[in-house]
Image (spheres, rainbow, N blue to C red):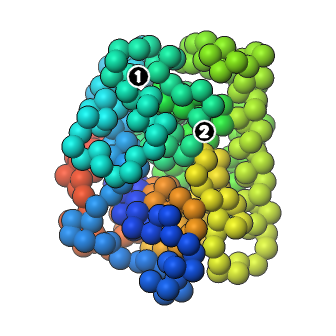
Amino acid sequence: MRRVAGSLFGLAYGDAIGGPVEFCAFEEIVRRHGPDGPRELPGDPAPVTDDTQLALAVGWALYDADGPTAELLEPHLRERFVAWLVSPDNDRAPGLTCLHACEGLQAGRPWQEATIVGAKGCGANMRATPIGLVPDIDEELVAAMAQFQAAMTHAHPTALAAAELTALAVWLLRDDHPVDRLPAMLRERCDSQRQVYRQDWLGGLWERAGAASAVDFIAHGWDECAGALDRLTDALGKPDDGGDACLATGAGWVAEEALATALYCALRHADDPVSALARAARTSGDSDSVASLAGAFQGAAHGMGAWPPQWAERIEYADQLRRLSQAWEPA
């Protein structure tokens, strides 16, 4: 089924389809693309945004790392994030949090000082999906590495928890867990991890953030993610009105909403991956990030067969997506 390739390419496809309509009102998107939303890659090659660029940065850092510890992974993430920062292709309206944090990393500051306190934008979890695709990785390493890569730029606990849930969703789907079970499984994760602070990976980040304790710090993030997943479950329990998904689960500019709204679109169109991308792009919020996550989820569930075959030759960074896919999932 080629689930690794399906997820990596799916993220890029959603990013490319959602990018041109980011910042557009729902009504404007419908006027331009019809009631079903955009369903084709725009351009040849179809350009992506910083979502795909940074997901590839994380993916290659994982590939290059000498082992699964914070000490071994940090220099590779730093190198890839700084390379993205100075790249001439970094011209896709990137988020200020990532820019400022990466500037601190470029200056050689310890990551705990470079990261941005209070930042919980979706920039930390839209790049986390490759972690769930690493070969022979267990649940706890997925969780730790997802939180760690998020923490290097976003020091809000919700950014960490949402990144973990995003990577775990991909990991579960790649392992053939049913899509409709995801909300309950992720919600259970919020409860089981509420008092788990990963000291070996995060060090004194909670003190930098001004929290009363490490547990208080991380519990806040899990509570916000739990609230977003509860809203998702409530929305899925109602008839689908076919409207703007952001009205059901949030605009997606912040981490927990991007996760919930991407899952909403993926679940509403569980057996039609292209429609899931179109639904995610046809939103009034952070359309490219929501669609990129929806694409990563659908691709992990259905493999490369989820997508029109001709798209693989038309997406920007196709060579990198293909090489990383082949490295982690040899034919």
At label 2, counting other C-alpha atoms closer than 10 Å, the crowd grade (few under 14, some 14-19, many 20 or more) is many
Horizontal and vertical percent for residue 172? 56, 48
Q: Residue at x 62, y 16 (%)?
A: 208
Q: Residue at x 73, y 36 (%)?
A: 222
Determine the CA span between mark 1 and mark 2: 18 Å
In the displayed structure image, the side of residue 131 where residue 162 appears, left or right: right
What residue is shown at x 53% (from left), y 59% (from top)?
Answer: 286
Q: In the image, is 93 to the left or to the right of 290?
A: left
The correct choice, above or below, for 46 with respect to 63 in the image is below
Q: Percent position (x, y) of residue 160?
A: 60, 33
Question: Mark 1 and 2 residues: CB-CB less than 8 Å, in contact?
Answer: no
Pointer 1 local density, CA inside 10 Å: few below 14, some 14–19, many at least 20: many
Residue 73's disc is: none
Q: Give the x, y percent position of residue 170.
A: 51, 49
Query: In the rendered image of this protein, does residue 150 appear above or below residue 200?
Result: below
Residue located at (58% from left, 68% from top): 284
Three-letter amino acid code of the residue under disc 1: Gly
Per the image, the residue denoted by label 2 is 120
Q: Earlier in the sequence, mark 1 or mark 2?
A: 1
Q: Amino acid at mark 2?
A: Lys
Foreground residue among 117 and 192: 117
Say what secondary structure mark 1 lies in: helix
Instruction: Using the image as rendered, state which of residue 181 and residue 245 is in the foreground.
Output: 245
Q: Which residue is mark 1?
A: 104
Instruction: Give residue 137's position: percent from left, percent from top.
Output: 46, 33
